[in-house]
Image (cartoon, rainbow, N blue to C red):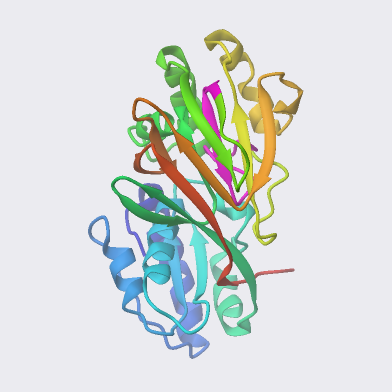
Amino acid sequence: MNPVAGGGRASQFWRRAAPGCLAAGLELEVFVTRRRGDAADRAAEAGNRPVIAVGGDGTAHEVVNGLLRRPAAEAPIFGALLAGTGADLVRSVSSPRRPEDVARWLSAGRFRRLDAARVATPTGRRYFINAADVGIGAEVVRRAALGPAFLPGTVNFMGAAVASLMVHRNAEVRLRLDDGPVKRLRSRTIAVANGSCLGGGMRMAPRARADDGLLEVVIIGDIGRLRGIRSLPLLYRGTHDRLREVEFAAARRVEVESELPIGVEADGELVGTTPAIFEILPGALRVLDWGP
């Protein structure tokens, strides 16, 4: 549990959920993170036990990285109680929104298979479960992290996106999907998505499915600043396919190179710069499910 996620909302959520879990006789070990990396390290040490991330998308990202970096005979069991600033993972990982439902969710033990993905950059490898991108997304993530935690993620990301669009320069990249030819283009961003949303609710990859063994690739080409700002509502509605600068594709492996380093983010975390290689890991996680 990340006590500062969402300006303390995650901690408040868990305090309201914990009594019901104790009353149900659930055997839980609660670990409170104190610094970046704590969640990943603790998840890596959890053995074969299910691990639940209580926080925002960043906390879930850390837990998944800890789970997938450890050797395991079968896919680890993961769950997320998302009460942080980020709001994107809830589209792919379902969980109770009411604290009083948490005990029933954990007791039911229902899970489904979920794909994960891996990105390799010159600074190392990271796993992600929702989405990553190369280009303006890394700048947006950096700016959004400076926004006030009490504001909804969508507000922070919208403000960060507008500010970044005012100064960002499109870059020449080389893109290769699976074993296809290398494509040279000038782009604003290349999103590599397992889930459908990123950036605090942008429906960047509306066709993405987190259990189909594919990465959805969304290429926003050489779009101008003013047109980019005007087009932001289309991204939140998932209707940006009408823009001539936007292309969609699907692949299991995506390679992006550039002459100058371009920032890369994954699940709202800065993870390095180009060159970057993205790969899908089909069914890498068993995710606790929640239904009506």
The N terminus, quarter of image:
bottom left
Quarter of the image that includes the C terminus: bottom right
Q: Is residue 116 magenta?
A: no
Left/right placement of residue 176 relative to residue 144 reads right
Q: Is residue 198 magenta?
A: yes
Q: Which residue appears at 55% of the width and 23% of the height?
A: 185
Q: Assign the magenta stretch its main secondary structure.
A: loop
Q: Where in the figure is residue 67, as x and y percent of width and height? A: 41, 71
Q: Find residue 191 and report its horizontal and vertical position in percent.
A: 55, 37
Residue at screen point 49% across, 91% down: 25
Residue 283 in the image: state x and y as whole percent.
Answer: 60, 69
Query: Residue at position x 41%, y 83% from top?
Result: 28
Q: Is residue 267 visible?
A: no
Q: Does the rendering let one see residue 120? A: yes
Q: Residue furthest bottom?
A: 25
Please give the name of the residue rendered at 49% of the width and 19% of the height, measured from the top-left corner.
162
Stretch of the chain drawn in magenta:
185-204
> Residue placed farthest to the left in the image?
35
Q: How many marks?
A: 0
Of 199 and 254, which appears nearest the observer?
A: 254
259 or 146: nearer the viewer: 259
The relative height of residue 255 versus residue 19 in the rendered view (above or below) is above
Q: Could you say where residue 260 lies in the image, as x and y percent from the top left?
A: 34, 25
Q: In terms of depth relative to the viewer, which is nearer, 65 or 140?
A: 65
